[in-house]
Amino acid sequence: MKEKLAKIKEEALRQIEDSDALEKLNEVRVNFLGKKGELTTVLKSMKDVAPEERPKVGQMVNELRDEIERVLEQAKSKMEEKAREAAMKREVIDVTLPAKRNLVGHRHPNRIVLDEVERIFIGMGYEVVEGPEVEYDYYNFEALNIPADHPAKDEQDTFYVTNDILLRTQTSPVQVRTMEKGKLPIRMIAPGRVFRSDEVDATHSPSFHQIEGMIVDKGITFADLKGTLAQFAKELFGEKTKVKFRPHHFPFTEPSAEVDVSCFKCGGEGCRFCKGSGWIEILGCGMVHPKVLKMSGIDPDVYSGFAFGIGLERITLLKYEIDDMRLLYENDIRFLKQF
């Protein structure tokens, strides 16, 4: 039995030494120490050993098992160390190489201007309110004092889904929905996308953005409207900017006006940008029509208000001196990265 154990030891150590991979070491472990391994076979044949010799043989088998396990662990550690060294050589990083530059996106010019407009009006105490882009005819037209036979309701200008549902042509419906809630006073702006059946050219698109604002409170006058828009123009276009109000007509305001600002390019002297007039039109406004207030459940004898509407793309084109609205939506990186 002693000679048999010596041969098993010799063969096990030889196989361990010849192993060049962890898989082969595992095979050696199974062949000699597994349930059907050489040492297990020896232990099963202990019944053939004289009773007085069994303790000694058992001790020899256990010592051999411990020695084989120790040598296996040593061989395994050496192989793992070599594998780590090889991996480190393969994965070496040259820290002197220039880093790869990640291209980081930025805000769209429309978003930049909208953030600035929101900042200005929030600073005046307004809140930003949003509403649905698919709207009822009532909120888009009737509640704004636009009767059924008004030219603005012509299907050539409006995208209708059904007879009563359409893609909103303005963000004024958000103002009506806010007034209907009955929570007064109201100081709000409603930015958002609107839709009109226009041909695409340098200044028109079937999908664009508007920012409409409104105040409803006791004692609101046209003087409040003029002061608010004058302050807005100065903060957006510069402290020296002047405003000019021209009489106009909008069904949902009375009186109504269009607002021009002095050309920030030439200072009002006249140039190509303002077509020699010294003024640039930027928005429409007026006092909220009493009928609009009444249809929204507000007593026009107690409350009054003003409203205004600004084309986001229009002021973006003006602020950055862009001469073609299509540039904002063509996703040309050469153009967008300038902002």
Image (cartoon, helix red, strand yellow):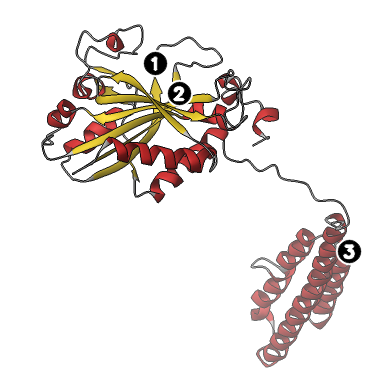
Residue 101, given in percent of the width and then of the height, sits at: 76, 46
Kindly identify which residue carries mark 1.
Answer: 196
Q: Nearer the viewer, mark 3 or mark 2?
A: 2
Kindly identify which residue carries mark 2.
Answer: 208
Please rate how many residues cluster around mark 3, counting C-alpha atoms within 10 Å: few if below 14, some from 14 to 19, many from 20. Answer: few
Q: Nearer the viewer, residue 82 or 17?
A: 82
Give me the C-alpha separation between circle 3 and circle 2: 77 Å
Element type at mark 3: helix
Kindly identify which residue carries mark 3.
Answer: 18
Q: Nearer the viewer, residue 294 or 16?
A: 294
Write down the quadrant of residue 222 in the picture: top left
Mark 2 or mark 1, earlier in chain: 1
Whether pointer 1 and pointer 3 mark residues with C-beta atoms closer than 8 Å, the reply is: no
Residue 194, given in percent of the width and then of the height, sits at: 39, 24
Give me the C-alpha separation between circle 2 and circle 1: 8 Å
Residue 109, given in percent of the width and then of the height, sits at: 57, 34
